[in-house]
Image (cartoon, coloured by chain):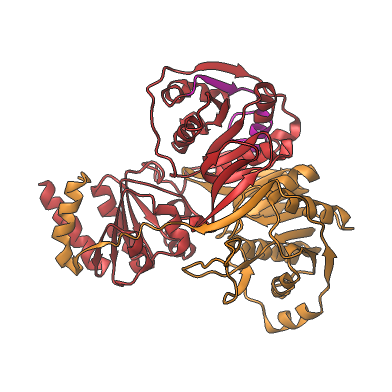
């Protein structure tokens, strides 16, 4: 049996976890899912749709929000009881962190950001390194495989399964397990609308935008296409835009249907965060910019002219 | 306040990576070396805390003896001393690395109030060493910290997530991992560089363990590289782009 940690934020499903469920199913064994926190029980329908027959719900009075070490303890309790062949999660900051706590509790190896898994003795994985620019082939010497699935390496596939049967359990938490937890939240940097991970369309700006005021036209185009604004690392480190909008290895990894990169040359770490987008359009003055190697379509020109023209042309076409 | 910052020597790769003939490592003959990006923020945070509150800042790394170069350049920023756990030059797996760091931390006379790591290494990105160290030392850990202050023995930290900011507090002693953007790392001054040459760097031999996550080899990731279709120059390309967007159902 393969156990998959399905991550959620106060009941809101992490979409990458559906890809982890799909990757788990491809290993040819039964798949069971686990969520941390009782709000996760609401996900029984969707995890069933993606092939999990059982949904284990770790419920505890001291798990009320993200509490990574408690997640590790709950997973440990469950693993010792169920003895799965592997525990998988999405290769997101939270997926990696929670499984690392499990691995530390059990003193077992963990392979992060895997694009391919073969169970055996030893287990074999392909995993991403150097912001996805290198693939490591590695053996994992342990009976239980603990691994996270590289974001966007597997397309989510539904099997139209019935809702998973919910099995609630109470992990035996120690006080140190919930010493670190979210105390409060501030939505100050979010726009309350579509988040980067969920957006179908992202219009991203880079150094070429020239300053914070240049993002007005990017916002306008994004909203016209029902999407959201992204940016490169130089933009957030210059303070032009909030960090929550940063796309890349050190920001958010995305794979929207349409990614428009304006004034972004394409540093290795930015490419790692957007190269899985379905259609990539580049607007750049430099015909040699590295990002063109990953693009489907390009306009060679100044975004300050192209984007306003594009926005008005789309308005016209929409009528 | 006594702070420890853990660092890793990594090659400074530009746009393209080249592998060694046996495909086990990156060819570094023509590359310089530095530390992982988030670690510059970690050192800056340590220097600031010691400036504000007094105490010491120790640097710790595991790697080849050449990693002394990275330790000296960070000592120039304002750290007090450094410890280098010398390997045979081979890359160690995360469990072996964490165990060696834990042994070295336990062997120190100083009981560090705060241990800081960068959020992820530029090269191997295993996302676990800091958590293994926290478990072994029985200390709380907050990861991916984007702003931090220490008040009355409590580390007050924020991390940035897709929906905004998460706020955490934890009593010291503790461990944090920090991200780029936490602060603006300073450049070493000329007197700083001079002093760094004389600061103590303890060299210790570290014993390798049999890796449980065993690297077989490396390969370059395939790039999409179908080449972009250029729709035009400047505003001349706009009509063609509108057609493409219509075709893919963008509006």
x%, y% of residue B76? 71, 75
Q: Residue A71 lies in magenta, yes or no?
A: yes
> In the rendered image, which quarter is residue B40 located in?
bottom right
- Which residue sits at x=17%, y=48%? B246
What is the x, y in percent for residue B14? 50, 70
Give me the residue at 44% from left, 44% from top: A153
Res B155 visible: no
Q: Which is nearer the eye, B76 or A271?
A: A271
**Residue A157, image quadrant:** top left
x, y percent for residue A255: 38, 47
In this rendering, would A146 be left or right of A196? right
Where, by quadrant of the figure, is residue B232 drawn?
A: bottom left
x 60%, y 29%: residue:
A64
**Above or below A203: residue A78:** above
> What color was chain A assigned in the picture?
red
Quarter of the figure that contains the N terminus of chain A: top right
């Amino acid at each position: 049996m393969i156990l998959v940690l399905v991550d959620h934020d106060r009941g809101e499903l992490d979409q990458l976890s559906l890809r982890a469920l799909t990757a788990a199913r491809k290993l040819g064994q039964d798949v069971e899912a686990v969520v941390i926190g009782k709000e996760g029980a609401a996900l029984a329908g969707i995890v069933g749709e993606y092939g999990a027959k059982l949904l284990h719900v770790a419920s505890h009075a001291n798990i009320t929000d993200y509490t990574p070490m408690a997640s590790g303890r709950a997973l440990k309790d469950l693993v010792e009881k169920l003895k799965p062949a592997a525990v998988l999660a999405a290769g997101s900051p939270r997926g990696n962190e929670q499984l690392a706590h499990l691995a530390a509790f059990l003193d077992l190896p963990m392979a992060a950001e895997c694009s391919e898994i073969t169970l055996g003795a030893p287990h074999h994985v392909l995993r991403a390194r150097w912001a996805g620019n290198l693939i490591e082939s590695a053996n994992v010497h342990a009976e239980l495989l603990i691994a996270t699935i590289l974001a966007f390496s597997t397309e989510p596939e539904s099997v139209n399964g019935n809702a998973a049967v919910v099995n609630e359990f109470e992990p035996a938490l120690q006080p140190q397990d919930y010493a670190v937890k979210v105390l409060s939240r501030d939505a100050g940097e979010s726009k309350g609308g579509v988040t980067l991970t969920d957006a179908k369309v992202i219009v991203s700006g880079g150094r070429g935008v020239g300053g914070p005021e240049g993002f007005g036209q990017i916002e306008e185009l994004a909203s016209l296409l029902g999407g959201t604004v992204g940016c490169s690392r130089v933009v957030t480190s210059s303070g032009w835009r909030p960090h929550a909008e940063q796309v890349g290895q050190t920001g958010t990894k995305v794979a929207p249907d349409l990614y428009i990169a304006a004034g972004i040359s394409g540093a290795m770490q930015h490419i790692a965060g957007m190269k899985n987008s379905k259609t990539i359009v580049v607007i750049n003055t430099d015909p040699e910019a590295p990002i063109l190697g990953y693009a489907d379509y390009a306009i060679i020109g100044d975004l300050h002219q192209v984007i306003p023209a594009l926005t008005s042309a789309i308005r016209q076409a929409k009528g | 306040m006594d702070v420890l910052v853990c660092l890793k020597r990594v090659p400074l790769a530009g746009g393209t990576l080249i592998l060694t003939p046996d495909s086990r490592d990156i060819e570094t003959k023509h590359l310089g070396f530095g530390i992982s990006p988030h670690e510059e923020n970690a050192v800056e945070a340590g220097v600031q805390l010691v400036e504000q509150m007094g105490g010491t800042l120790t640097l710790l790394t595991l790697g080849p003896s050449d990693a002394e170069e990275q330790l000296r350049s960070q000592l120039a920023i304002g750290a007090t001393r450094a410890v280098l756990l010398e390997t045979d030059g081979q890359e160690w797996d995360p469990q072996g690395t964490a165990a060696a760091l834990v042994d070295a931390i336990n062997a120190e006379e100083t009981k560090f109030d705060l241990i800081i790591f960068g959020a992820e290494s530029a090269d191997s990105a295993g996302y676990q060493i800091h958590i293994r160290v926290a478990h072994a030392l029985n200390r709380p850990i907050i990861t991916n910290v984007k702003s931090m202050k220490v008040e009355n023995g409590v580390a007050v930290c924020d991390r940035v997530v897709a929906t905004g900011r998460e706020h955490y507090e934890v009593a010291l002693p503790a461990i944090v991992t920090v991200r780029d953007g936490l602060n603006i790392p300073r450049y070493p001054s000329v007197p700083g560089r001079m002093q760094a040459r004389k600061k103590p760097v303890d060299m210790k031999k570290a014993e390798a363990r049999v890796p449980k996550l065993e690297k077989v080899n490396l390969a370059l990731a395939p790039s999409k590289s179908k080449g972009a279709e250029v729709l035009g120059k400047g505003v001349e390309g706009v009509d063609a782009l509108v057609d493409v967007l219509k075709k893919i159902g963008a509006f």
